[in-house]
Amino acid sequence: MTGVDPRLPVTLLTGFLGSGKTTLLSGLLRENASGPFAIVINEFGEVALDQDLVGRVDGQVTVMSGGCLCCAIGGDLAATLLDLHKRRAAQPFARVVIETSGLADPGPLLAPFAEDIRLARLFRVDGVVAVVDALQGLRELGRRRVCIKQVALADRIVLSKSDIAAPLAVSRLRDRLTEINPFAPQLIVSHGVVDSGWLLQPPVRPAAAPARQCADNARHEPGHADDIAAFCLTFDAPLRWDSFVEAWTRLTDAHGDAILRLKGLLDIEGHPVAVHGVRRLLHPPETLAQWPDAAHGSRLVVIAEDLTDADVRACFSGLDDFAETRASSTDAARGVGQVRCIG
Ligand SMILES: Nc1nc2c(ncn2[C@@H]2O[C@H](COP(=O)(O)OP(=O)(O)OP(=O)(O)O)[C@@H](O)[C@H]2O)c(=O)[nH]1
């Protein structure tokens, strides 16, 4: 049989919280050699930030927030893709990239592409890319089964952050990745700068490679993120950077290993600043050239294990005070910090 497969290729981009998926996606979009893409981003928290942080936001980015794709909103994925396909004449694209939440198990996400006849006719998954953080990866692989599944199902593995990890740790991690998935080529990528040809080329799977859609891999493990919650904070009044760092230090000192991820877009004395915390590490902040949308104001998501709303609120209370002080001297109606548990 000859002929080109007319179905649209789909790349599933997976990897644990904060590993560098959005950074890689931004790199792909910047390179733009294989585009145009339609992007579907799934975020665990209800306040979606990746759309703002991905660097290029246009009509082709769809955000599915409020849960992890493989459990809470999995059924919506087919509807989202079918809708994208319908709008394709107006907004053409050659590939869909789905960035899963860091907590998603990619197995159950692959199944509908084989089982749902409407999807199977229009789309084919031609690659699963797993991003693994060279600094935290070995530890997360030891702690969370979902990380092992992300690596096991990958066709390509991208190692991020080797620039800030010890060479020995990187080499141990690579050995462990090879143990889990000997078939997937590994590539060290710094700050998302990647050759899209390498990343997106369809995998050649040896006959012995485990079938991705086998029953075990497609089986969803209910409750795999039950102990994890996302806490969303917003502050209307501008914040000071040193006050924010103090709050982050309070949070990680008090709750250490419970903190999985922080990400936010902050109003630092009038300037939009993107912040990322992964475990105890606060990455260097990035001042954006402009606000991504009309809403100016700080938005922060903290993803943590076994913490309560009050635990998080207590650590950020200093920020509240600062915001309220500024608000009272400028505009009494602004500056109310909110903490909301949505997990
Ligand atoms: N030093 C260094 N930092 C990196 C690299 N790749 C990503 N980062 C930083 O890691 C932080 C988290 O990166 P993201 O791309 O937001 O991670 P993510 O996997 O999309 O995060 P979630 O969506 O929360 O799961 C950011 O501060 C990035 O700038 C890298 O290769 N080196």
Image: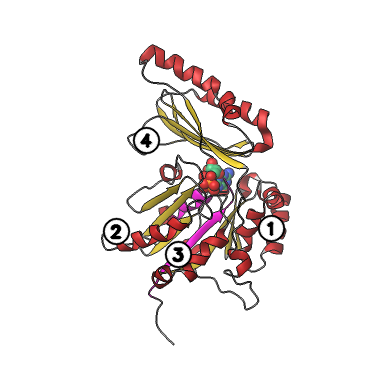
**Sequence order check: which comes first, mark 4 or mark 2?**
2
At label 2, which amino acid type do we have? Gln
Q: Residues within 10 Å of mark 2 (few under 14, many from 20)?
A: some
- Distance between the alpha carbons at the discs numbered 3 and 2: 17 Å
**Sequence order check: which comes first, mark 2 or mark 1?**
2
Q: Which mark is residue 291?
A: 4
Q: Which mark is residue 91?
A: 2
**Sequence order check: which comes first, mark 1 or mark 4?**
1
- Distance between the alpha carbons at the discs numbered 2 and 1: 40 Å
The residue closer to the viewer here, 76 or 247, is 76
Q: Which residue is mark 1?
A: 174
The residue closer to the viewer here, 15 or 68, is 68
Q: Which mark is residue 10?
A: 3
Mark 4 or 2: in front is 2
Mark 4, secondary structure of its residue? loop
Write down the region rendered in magenta. Answer: 6-28
**Sequence order check: which comes first, mark 1 or mark 3?**
3
Q: Residues within 10 Å of mark 1 (few under 14, many from 20)?
A: many
Mark 2, secondary structure of its residue? loop
Mark 2 or 1: in front is 2
Identify whether 39 is placed above or below 45: below
At label 3, which amino acid type do we have? Val
At label 1, which amino acid type do we have? Arg
**Sequence order check: which comes first, mark 3 or mark 2?**
3
Mark 3, secondary structure of its residue? strand
Identify whether 321 is placed above or below 260: above
Residue 195 can be seen in this image? no
At label 4, which amino acid type do we have? Trp
